[in-house]
Image (tube, rainbow, N blue to C red):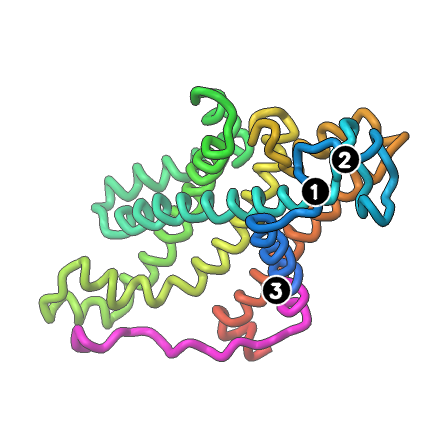
Amino acid sequence: MSDATPAFAPLPRLRLTPAFLIGATLVGLHVVVGLLTLIWTPYDPTAMTGGRLAPPSLAHWAGTDRLGRDLFTEIMIGARIALSVGIGAVAIAAAIGVTVGLLAAFASRAVDDVLAATLDILIAFPTLLLAMLIVAASDGASLGTAILAIGIAASSIVARLTRILARRVLAMDYITAARVSGTGWLGIVRIHVLPNIWPTLIVNFALQFGLAVIAEASLSYLGLGAPPPNASWGRLLQEAQATVYTAPFGAIAPGIALVSLVIGLNLFADGLRDVADPTRRRR
């Protein structure tokens, strides 16, 4: 096979399954809300515009929090924070994980064994625990620190998957032919490896996005995420914990927002998996 002919199948047509449509709709709704907060919110997120712990009304669709701030505005801001964390963490995990995974796939047997053992050890630790350790070792809790910590913690999973997929591609006969024809390892990665592994990687990135959203909410709930006045969903849940019996909607509303986004991302990833896996497409 010549260098000019990439060894990958054409992009399959996207199947609009009900699960994929529901997932895309939920994710798209959160994206629209997150982008909308850049130019408009119902109220100033720091302004005390109503009574403390007011129930949902026409003036305040989700009620108010313990300080009298509009809860619906804070939930909208939380959508933007969740999406920012997901995008940033997945970008960091992809950059580190794909690079390390490709290096392990092309490395010698001894180096590959060391990298594989290191990745297995890192994966054995929960993502949230690794993120907590990284945040604790940094200067202090912030949104940027949370994104960096979650991205680094998730990179080991991406690296291990990349290594497995890349080694599978490198074992093919057309890779041997490409090497015999004089193609360097950068050319093999660009022409043959990446085009064959990216569909599976994209599915994993969608799943990692959902995990990053949950991890950020957990860090914020524990006081290690975005500090006030950032209206993270995890912080809203933490603040509503003391008044969950007297004003339950303060915990229900951000909980619904968090669950709907994570469910949407998982359904979206499942739809992408149908495209990436030919056997699932045939079924």
Between the residue at mark 2 and the residue at mark 1, the CA separation in whole angstroms equals 8 Å
Image quadrant where residue 53 sits = top right
Residue corresponding to mark 1: 43
* Sequence-first tag of 2 and 1: 1
Q: Which residues are magenta?
A: 1-23
**Magenta stretch encompasses residue 17:** yes
Q: Nearer the viewer, mark 3 or mark 1?
A: 1
Disc 2 + disc 1, Cβ < 8 Å: yes
What amino acid type is highlighted by mark number 3?
Ala
Disc 3 + disc 1, Cβ < 8 Å: no
Which element type, helix, strand or loop, lies under badge 2?
A: loop
- Hey, which residue is sitting farthest right in the picture? 246
Q: Foreground residue, 12 or 168?
A: 12
Residue corresponding to mark 3: 24
Q: Within 10 angstroms of label 3, few (less than 14), some, or many (20 or more) residues? A: many
User: Residue at the location (60% across, 33% down)?
Assistant: 230
